[in-house]
Amino acid sequence: MRKTILITGASSGIGKATAIHFQQQGWNVIATMRSPEKETELRTSQNIHLEKLDVLDVESISQAIQNGIQKFGKIDALVNNAGYGAYGALEAFPRENIVRQFNTNVIGLIDVTKAIIPHFRQNKEGVIVNISSIGGQMTFALGSLYHGTKFAVEGISESLQYEMAEIGVKVKIVEPGFIATDFGGRSFDFQAGEIAEYKPIINALMKQWQNPNNTISPPSLVAEVIFSAVTDGTNQLRYRAGDDANFLLDSRKKMTDAEFFEMMNKQLGK
């Protein structure tokens, strides 16, 4: 019998690559997104079912899960992938943008997870994969909001695994490095602001992001890591995705705060 996975934020990037990878591995896929009517590639794929789901709309979450169960009979795994990055000087961010960042990346993830747990508890099995980032273990300049949400995802996931073990459910965290997605486009909220004191660090960070020597992995690599996390049958909590993720996270663990900040500041030309 085919197993079924529900993926949020499946319209592009990691979410779409994950939907395609699981379908190729013989899974049923409930690919959710805010505007499924605009999706063309996944619509033509066998055993991929599109559903409307906005993590800011609790009713759409419940409906997508119900429709997915009705379509395939059971959901075996959830990938909480929907999210975006807010970067810039904290002082420059309007409060509504701050609230939206946390509502999308944290509260939305919690709402989707909470909505599917009763189904997993009834089945006495399931896998929850939360897409974090290397930014859930370390930080870059101007990312206080984004990193705040990813640190929250890490803490939520690590604690959640204790109670989920009581009902036969595994919790996994996937930590990608730099990935070739639209993170700099529609999945990105950059607030430069007009405060002169922050201009040097903003310009330095933008220059660093555009460095052609940066290691950038394809979304398909993350999809493969997610598949391993879902199917390996272990209680492993964290999974890295990308050579840069290994280097940066290993460096963060080995260095003192001062040493790591010095290394990161050098990257900014300071």
Image (cartoon, rainbow, N blue to C red):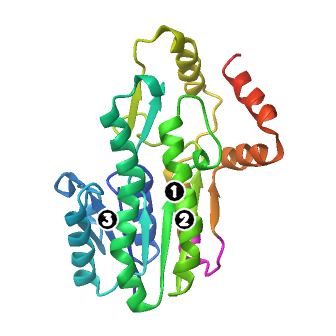
> Can residue 71 be seen in the rendering of this structure?
yes
Which residue sits at x=40%, y=12%? Answer: 194
Q: Nearer the viewer, residue 110 or 269?
A: 110
Residue 69 vertical position relative to residue 100 in the rendered view, above or below = below
Total numbered labels placed on residues in the image: 3
Q: Give the residue type that dot 1 points to.
A: Val
The span from disc 3 to disc 1 (Cα, nearest Å) is 21 Å
The span from disc 2 to disc 3 (Cα, nearest Å) is 22 Å
Task: Using the rendered view, name the quadrant where residue 261 is placed.
Answer: top right
Would residue 134 be found to the left or right of residue 31 on screen? right
Which mark sits nearer the N-terminus, 3 or 1? 3
Would residue 217 be found to the left or right of residue 36 on screen? right
Q: Give the residue type that dot 2 points to.
A: Ser
Q: Which residues are magenta?
A: 228-236
Task: Using the rendered view, name the quadrant where residue 19 is placed.
Answer: bottom left
Residue found at the far top of this picture: 196
Q: Please tell me the numbered disc located at residue 157.
A: 2
Q: Give the residue type that dot 3 points to.
A: Ala
Q: Nearer the viewer, residue 123 or 245?
A: 123
Q: How far from the left and from the top, in percent, is residue 117?
A: 39, 78
Q: Residues within 10 Å of mark 1 (few under 14, many from 20)?
A: many
Q: How far from the left and from the top, in percent, is residue 260?
A: 76, 35
Q: How far from the left and from the top, in percent, is residue 200?
A: 57, 12
Which residue sits at x=72%, y=50%? Answer: 246
> Do tag 2 and tag 1 residues touch (Cβ < 8 Å)?
yes
